[in-house]
Amino acid sequence: MNMRSRKNRSRFYTLLLVLILLASGCMVGPNFIRPKAAVSPNWLGAGDQRVKTEPSEYRNWWQAFNDPVLDRLIDRAYRENLSLKIAGVRVLQARAQLGIAIGGPFPQTQQASGFLQYNRISENAPLAGAFSKFTYSQDQVGINASWELDFWGRFRRTIESADATWLATVADYDNALVSLTSDVANSYILIRTLERRIDIAHQNVEIQRESLKIAEARFQYGTTSELDVEQAKTVLNNTLASIPTLETQLRQAKDALSILLGLPPSNLADFLEGPSEIPVSPPEVAVGIPADLLRRRPDIRSAEYQAVAQCAQIGVAKADLYPAFSLSGMFGFGSSDVGQSNLSDIFKWKSRTYQIGPAFQWNIFNYGRITNNVRLQDARFQELLITYQNAVLTAQQEVEDNLAAFLRAQERAEFLAQSAAAARRSVDLAVLQYREGIKDFTTVLTAQQALLTEQDNLAATLGNISSNLVGVYRALGGGWEIREGKELVPPDIKETMAKRTNWGKLLAPATYNPPAAEEPKSFIRLPDW
């Protein structure tokens, strides 16, 4: 090898080393910075003695109702709800997509190839006379590789985006779990409330039937007119007519709860076995401070991670504005049966063939299209920043709305309890006075209608108190913590997927179930193959 050849080779290797070093340090596009969001220093109802602002644990918030049936229902829903399972599988999808992105910085083309050809040259082809024969064979085997260097950080930004998208799907799973626990609790409270309202309606039917008997007896003895009898029948039948409507609502509530439990519509007799009482909520609630929502609410975390993912896409788009540098190479063996060669000589060292060298590609005539793509990605990023800020505001509104409804419903229940007690006493007095002929039947009818209304309103309000407390816990983002340390995808589903497809290590919890409160950050993860 002459001196000039050695110098050229030395320069070539120096150029490769410089390109590789530069490719590892440059990364275009903005780095994510969490946007400022308007957060109140405290809740509007913080001055109420029933509102506690000290930090609290919301992992098993439904246990505040001290109802074993509700505990069993939520445990069943967590294990069997199909929508939650869908959210878990979506986490796996995002984790696999991250694995694809992680492979980006490595040589993009890695191929082993080979061929065996039989060729015939046309005798009428130009220069055909130079050949001693017009047929020959040739064979070749080798490997090809092409590596686009991550000079501008395109692949690292892609990994950053895929990583944030993965974390967003985990936050979406947590948000689905928050919704599931609150939906189960609300459905159960509605069922118990409807059962209580139906029971109240039946009790009033018995009261009204007794009044009808009194009116019929007095009519038979001629002490009153038939009008009293017909009015009594009207009130009685009107109360009876309200029961089918309530029973329809009860059936629909049980059907909805069945679906949440991963069951076809059923009576849920085994699950609802126990006292048919409306869950009683505690009079006080701990809500912490508004700033806690940024950490606890999964939908806020998801909105932030989505913004992180889109921020990285700006860098991916900007990389297209600059030239793409790559290295390509080939090494193999080839031979033919032309001249003194033979096909069997393919694996002899003198049959080797190789090539290697750098290249670049620059879309210099597409600058307008590429620039507008950068603008598009930036506009989407700005949209997601505003979406995050709006999610923070909406979360505070939901807490304030449900907290106010919870407190005011308690006050309403106190008045309705007194009203219902007074209405019950009014019915007793009205019936007694009517029996003695002191009052007319209109007084009895008015008292009975008021009794039914007040008792029904009280039952509905008691249900609303509990539902509003559920709404407070839902707005606070409580309940998702029960999945910590557990798998997001049930073992039976993972077993089925593993039998169908080679998932490698990706089905291990550690590879697809990151810490829920992991902060957005930029880094490259090692592949899990």
Image (cartoon, grey):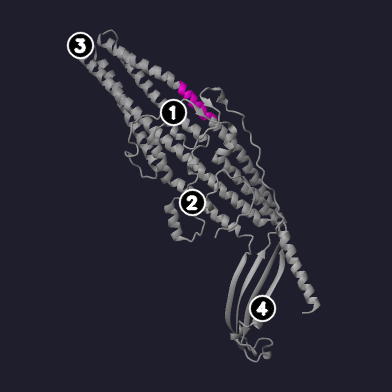
Q: Estimate the x, y position of residue 151 in percent, counting from the top left.
A: 71, 59
Position of 274 compared to 119: left or right?
Answer: left
Relative to 224, say whether 397 is above or below. below
Q: Secondary structure at mark 3?
A: loop
Q: Estimate the x, y position of residue 413 in percent, counting from the top left.
A: 43, 22
Camera-near label (3 vs 4) is: 4
Segment tinted magenta in the rendering: 400-411
Camera-near label (2 vs 1) is: 1
Q: What residue would you read off at disc 3?
A: 222
Q: What residue would you read off at disc 4?
A: 353
How crowded is the residue under tag 2: few (<14 C-alpha within 10 Å), some, or many (20+)? some
Task: Report the Cα–Cα distance between label 2 and label 1.
Answer: 35 Å
Quadrant in which the N terminus is drawn: bottom right
Give the residue type at disc 1. Ser
> Disc 2, disc 1: CB below 8 Å?
no
Q: What residue would you read off at disc 1?
A: 281
Mark with earlier residue (3, 4): 3
Closer-to-camera residue (239/399): 399
Give the residue type at disc 4. Thr
Position of 123 compared to 179: left or right?
Answer: right
